[in-house]
Image (cartoon, rainbow, N blue to C red):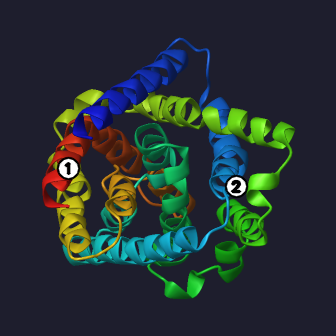
Amino acid sequence: MAGIILNQIVIMFLYMLVGFGLYRWGKLTKEGSRDIAALLVNIVIPVVIVRSFCVERSTARLAALGASTVVAVLALGASMLIARLVYRREPIEDFGTAFSNAGFIGLPLVQSVLGADAVFYLVPFVVLLNLGQWSYGVAIMTGDPGKLRPRAILVNPFTFSTAIGLLLFLSGLGDKLPEVIGSTMQGIAAVNSPLAMIVLGVYLAQADLVAMVGNWRLYAVSAVRLLLVPAATILILALLPYDVRIRETVLIAAAAPVGANVAIYAQLNGRDYTYACQTVVMSTLLSIATMPAVMALAERVL
């Protein structure tokens, strides 16, 4: 497992270099990368989620969905608690260590390493993470729980795609869609990894790498996000009786680097946008080493 993870991370890093090069050579602008990110959030990732539900309905799968939801709640709860304990007075660090890059990195990794069907187990984590960002995350960044946006929690691409996917799965129509629709969804889902990493490559190209290397705060944030949170998650998963594939799926997402949304929320709420971007870039670079190590440890423990 660890070797496969390392291989996939290297591939994803090469995708990042494509984005880095395109930005540095003037072939892809900051606005263009935002358009790609919007395409990912509004179309590609929702299609990946819906497609994961396009399987035969069975009692075993219903039980697995319930189990993966329980695991996701516990894993996210642990990460938010750790982030709050370590970074109570630091909104960017609190947000960044609480919420991983499950959509842009965790999901493509699960797709590549465990197979497209394993995304089914990851959906609860991705949905709950995004709901957490739009609710608890907003409270962190604003410092004002009164600014929560209930409508934004419910009306978003992840909630919609999960609702559509559940409807298809529970109605038994998921595995009976016309081949042309299935092939279209497969084609869209296939661009998830390359596009997500190209966007992160543009983030990397905009970062001051020299300044980043000398900033100890970035290493501290990365250590909490990439080592402390996954270690706590492994301890929790070791106590659960669920299928190891479900636990490995959630662990991959929980061990992912700082989520790119920290930069978006920092910018929207007048926080240090540049520093927020740096936490994403630094933790993503360091995850090349930490994620295979975390999965190697998990193989022994789980």
Judged from this view, the residue extending furthest toward the top is 25
- How far apart marks 2 and 1 lie (CA) works out to 31 Å
Q: SS class of the residue under badge 1?
A: helix
The foreground one among 175 and 101 is: 175
Which callout, 2 or 1, points at the residue further toward the start of the chain?
2
Residue type highlighted by circle 1: Val
User: Residue at the location (31% across, 37% down)?
Assistant: 5
The image position of residue 27, as x and y in percent, is 61, 15
Residue assigned mark 1: 294
Answer left or right for 121 relative to 239: right
How many neighbours does mark 2 have within 10 angstroms: few (below 14), some (14-19), or many (20 or more)?
many
How many neighbours does mark 1 have within 10 angstroms: few (below 14), some (14-19), or many (20 or more)?
many
The foreground one among 100 and 254 is: 254
Residue assigned mark 2: 54
Q: Which quadrant would residue 186 be assigned to in this image?
A: top right
| Mark carried by residue 105 | none
The image position of residue 11, as x and y in percent, is 40, 25
Q: In the rendered image, which quarter contains the C terminus? A: bottom left
